[in-house]
Amino acid sequence: MHIRLLAVGDRQPPWVDDAFRLYSGRFPPQWKFRLDVIATAKRSKADSAKRAIETEGKLILGKLTADERAVLLDERGKQMTSKSLAGRLSDWQTDGRDLCLIIGGPDGVSDRCRQRADFIWSLSDLTLPHGLARVLLAEQMYRAWSLNSGHPYHRS
């Protein structure tokens, strides 16, 4: 199973890039992990957020393949513990399909993206800035891998 993160938001503060690289650099090589970034759609006072959501949604859907498992990060999704994420990751790996994790734009994702998702995951009840969500996602994926492989990173 290969894993990638498809994230809307092309400019992140240096600390986000550094922290994301720190955790994603620890991923196992068989994941062949990659980050694909989609530029945030232009927004103006005259344009509604809906137009940007639809534009970004089309770009997200255009980058997904039909056989990928799509996991959308959304505040209305299912929350998991680190251990339950590890179990789900194990199931996904057993399934064998490639995994695409998706972080939408600042105003959310289109209904079509939500419908395409095989699973909708909420990192927290808190509203998180996209850069922090990116870092938290990478850390939790590393933690899930460490739990599944018996690595001592996770201590309970």
Image (tube, rainbow, N blue to C red):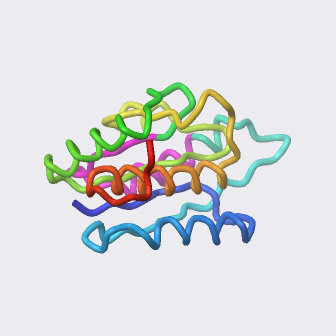
* Horizontal relation, residue 81 to residue 97: left or right: right
Is residue 99 rendered magenta in the image?
no
Q: Quadrant of residue 11?
A: bottom right
Closest to the observer: 102 or 142?
142
Q: Is residue 88 above or below residue 146?
A: above
Closest to the observer: 44 or 40?
40
Quadrant occupied by the C terminus: top left
Residues shaded magenta: 54-72
Quadrant occupied by the N terminus: bottom left
Q: Position of residue 112 (x, y in %)?
A: 42, 34
Q: Quadrant of residue 118?
A: top left
Q: Residue furthest right?
A: 45
Q: Is residue 132 above or below residue 53?
A: below
Give the residue drawn at x 24%, y 56%: 98
* Horizontal relation, residue 151 to residue 73: left or right: left
Q: Position of residue 141 (x, y in %)?
A: 42, 53
Q: Position of residue 9 (x, y in %)?
A: 63, 58
Give the residue drawn at x 27%, y 63%: 2
